[in-house]
Image: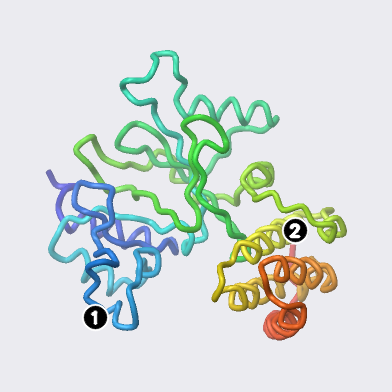
């Protein structure tokens, strides 16, 4: 069949990369990554400096993609985190489940109705099993984790640390196809509110929410503080620096007061185990760096 040929899958991989989606090869006719695992890493090539996982090796470089898909009909994985995507996975009930079990599409429709929202019109694919993937974009400062069942039964989400099988891929069950070519739209605020980690902080009360820009900034602040709180030993200072650099742009654009960002990240850094002095130093460095590089106020 023609869609099994490496050339067709290569074209689909290149097309995904043109959207800014970072791709990597999956096993032919399978959903599992085709890249080697850490236990058998040869520590050469991309891994010369240490084992690099599929999320780190996912790329939008057309030359790397052409080399990877040159000879074998690899399926296509899209690393959602590096691609700035959150994908809502609406699954089908297992064959052995009760005949009355609603599918993910039905459950998601009911969720939208309860929220008083229409089902979002965005880029959508049909999976090999008959489910659906809804693609949404998020700003660079927003980090959401994968979820399973958080939005409802048979509804999962893929974000940082996750991937989805791209259109053009196929398994023994069937192909992955585009059912709505609409470009991905921003993740709706009401969906973000359901997926965001619950990290109450008194400093967040002061975040203005009168405009879409400041709501986006507030969402980024919540996500970055949650990431800093969860940072592991050895990564805490670098995580705090990264968060400060990500949020500094919102200060420069006038969407967040610097005092609010400093207080939230200081609290998160100290709760992760950093000293107050180290937090202050890292925050000053990261925020100053970001503000200096984002001097323009964002237009509406």
Note whether 260 is above or below 214 in the view shown.
below
Quarter of the image where the N terminus is located: top left
Residue 258's x, y, as percent?
A: 82, 73
Which residue is pictured at 72% across the width and 78% down the height?
Answer: 275
Note whether 73 is above or below 178 in the view shown.
below
Q: Is residue 137 left or right of residue 194?
A: left
Which residue is pictured at 22% across the width and 41% down the height?
Answer: 171
> Is disc 1 surrounded by few (<14), some (14 to 19) or many (20+) residues within 10 Å?
few
Residue 151's x, y, as percent?
A: 57, 36
Q: Quadrant of residue 277?
A: bottom right
Q: Is residue 298 left or right of residue 205?
A: left
Quarter of the image where the C terminus is located: bottom right
- The answer to which of marks 1 and 2 sits earlier in the sequence is 1
Distance in Å between CA atoms under marks 1 and 2? 42 Å
The local secondary structure at tag 2 comes to helix
Q: Quadrant of residue 289?
A: bottom right
Residue 68's x, y, as percent?
A: 22, 67
Residue that carries the numbered disc 1 in the rendered image: 44
The local secondary structure at tag 1 comes to loop
Nearer to us: label 1 or label 2: 1
Note whether 285 is above or below 300 in the view shown.
below
Q: Quadrant of residue 9?
A: bottom left
Q: Nearer the viewer, residue 99 or 225?
A: 225
Residue that carries the numbered disc 2 in the rendered image: 218
Q: Residue furthest right?
A: 206
Which residue is pictured at 69% across the width and 49% down the height?
Answer: 198
């Amino acid at each position: 069949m023609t869609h099994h040929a490496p050339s067709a899958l290569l074209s689909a991989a290149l097309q995904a990369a043109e959207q800014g989606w970072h791709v990597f090869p999956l096993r032919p006719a399978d959903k599992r990554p085709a890249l080697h695992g850490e236990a058998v890493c040869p520590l050469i090539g991309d891994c010369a400096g240490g084992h690099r996982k599929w999320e780190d090796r996912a790329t939008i470089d057309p030359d790397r993609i052409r080399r990877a898909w040159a000879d074998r009909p690899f399926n296509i994985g899209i690393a959602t985190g590096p691609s700035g995507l959150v994908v809502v996975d609406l699954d089908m009930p297992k064959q052995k489940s009760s005949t009355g079990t609603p599918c993910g599409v039905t459950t998601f429709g009911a969720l939208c109705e309860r929220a008083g929202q229409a089902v979002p019109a965005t880029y959508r694919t049909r999976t090999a099993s008959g489910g659906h993937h809804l693609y949404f974009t998020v700003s660079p400062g927003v980090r959401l984790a994968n979820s399973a069942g958080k939005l409802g039964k048979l509804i999962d989400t893929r974000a940082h640390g996750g991937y989805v099988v791209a259109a053009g891929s196929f398994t023994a069950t069937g192909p992955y196809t585009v059912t709505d070519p609409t470009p991905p739209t921003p993740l709706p605020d009401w969906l973000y509110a359901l997926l965001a980690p619950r990290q109450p902080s008194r400093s967040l009360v002061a975040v203005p929410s009168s405009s879409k820009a400041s709501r986006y900034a507030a969402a980024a602040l919540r996500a970055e503080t949650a990431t800093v709180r969860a940072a592991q030993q050895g990564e805490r200072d670098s995580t705090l620096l990264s968060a400060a650099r990500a949020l500094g742009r919102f200060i420069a654009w006038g969407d967040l007061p610097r005092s609010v960002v400093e207080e939230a990240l200081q609290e998160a850094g100290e709760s992760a185990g950093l000293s107050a002095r180290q937090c202050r130093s890292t925050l000053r460095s990261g925020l100053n760096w970001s503000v200096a590089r984002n001097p323009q106020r964002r237009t509406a």
